[in-house]
Image (cartoon, helix red, strand yellow):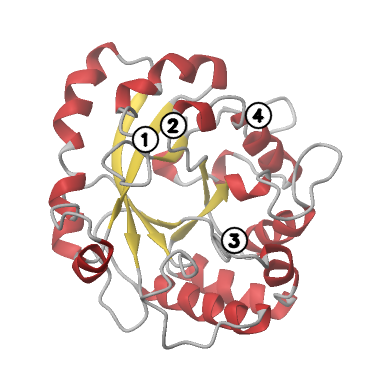
Amino acid sequence: KMNGSGLYNTPSDLHVHTNLSFCAPRQTLASSYLPHCGQEGVTTLGFSNHIYAPRYLKRAGIPEERGGDYALRLRRELEELQPSAPVRLLLGCEVETFCGEEPTLSPQEAKNFDYVLLAASHIMNFPDEYRNYDLSTPAKLRALILERFLRACELEYPVPTGICHPLYPICSPWEQEVVDGITDSQLADCFTLAAAKNKSIEIHACLYRRGTALDEEGLSPSYLRVLAAAKACGCRFHFGSDAHSPDAFQGVHRLLLLAAQRLGITREDIWPIARG
């Protein structure tokens, strides 16, 4: 849908988690979000639980069953919910792309999902996986995040594929420094490739989570600059609250939509699977 100016005004949310992600509360179910979709204006809801590398699961003491098959357990629940759900329900997943490792989802496995989100900037979340890398400064972390983004763009899956929280240093103490230090030419290189490889770019919750300074409307100018570069390069977009519980889902889509409108995003700029 569009408003009178042609800007997109119906947010979907293709990045929410349930208790199949070990970082989400055990009481978070797919059905937990449905009562809040009307108030949020969300018309399509996509669940993107983490798919972890077996090696990481073993090190972290997490049951190894939490791989692709585990994420697929949600399919039956969504099929049961859909007839009475107030929104369209989709099953995606959030795939890790560790250095030196194959992605945690194969192209064959991806056929079981409606879409795939690639997590290319989960670096500080997994210190064991990156223990051999020197990440002692914002510049060094930034360089690795840029490298991981470009590699993620090259991954090919037989379903629609996006990149979540693109170029954002999740769980880093230097969020502002890393984001602000990305040059215009680096942004152009990243998003030119993303557009060429048909990777959707996420309008993500890091826009309002206070890891970077916020403006008077509650949005991050630093991260809006990143997304503006993506739009200038012709990328498509999707919305992602990255909610792990209904509390993080409520009251945030107006901010994601405000960001899209400030970026001048129209229906044509939205990832087709994410259009309301």
| Element class at badge 1 | loop
Name the residue carrying label 3: 234
Horizontal side of 46 relative to 144 (left or right) equals left
In primary-sequence order, the first of circles 4 and 2 is 2
Which amino acid does the dot numbered 2 rest on?
Ser
Name the residue carrying label 4: 254
Q: Position of residue 189 (x, y in %)?
A: 60, 78
| Element class at badge 3 | loop
Which amino acid does the dot numbered 4 rest on?
Arg
Name the mark on residue 245.
Answer: 2
Report whether residue 124 is seen. yes
Q: Nearer the viewer, residue 30 or 57?
A: 57
Q: Nearer the viewer, mark 4 or mark 3?
A: 4
Q: Nearer the viewer, mark 4 or mark 1?
A: 1
The alpha-carbon separation of the residues under discs 3 and 1 comes to 37 Å
Name the residue carrying label 1: 25
Which amino acid does the dot numbered 3 rest on?
Gly
Residue at image location 58% in from the left, 65% down from the top: 169
The alpha-carbon separation of the residues under discs 4 and 3 comes to 24 Å
Residue at image location 60% in from the left, 83% down from the top: 136
Do tag 1 and tag 2 residues touch (Cβ < 8 Å)? yes
In primary-sequence order, the first of circles 3 and 1 is 1
Number of other residues with Cα within 10 Å of mark 2, as a class: few under 14, some 14 to 19, many 20 or more = many
In primary-sequence order, the first of circles 4 and 1 is 1
The alpha-carbon separation of the residues under discs 4 and 2 comes to 17 Å
Q: Nearer the viewer, mark 1 or mark 2?
A: 1
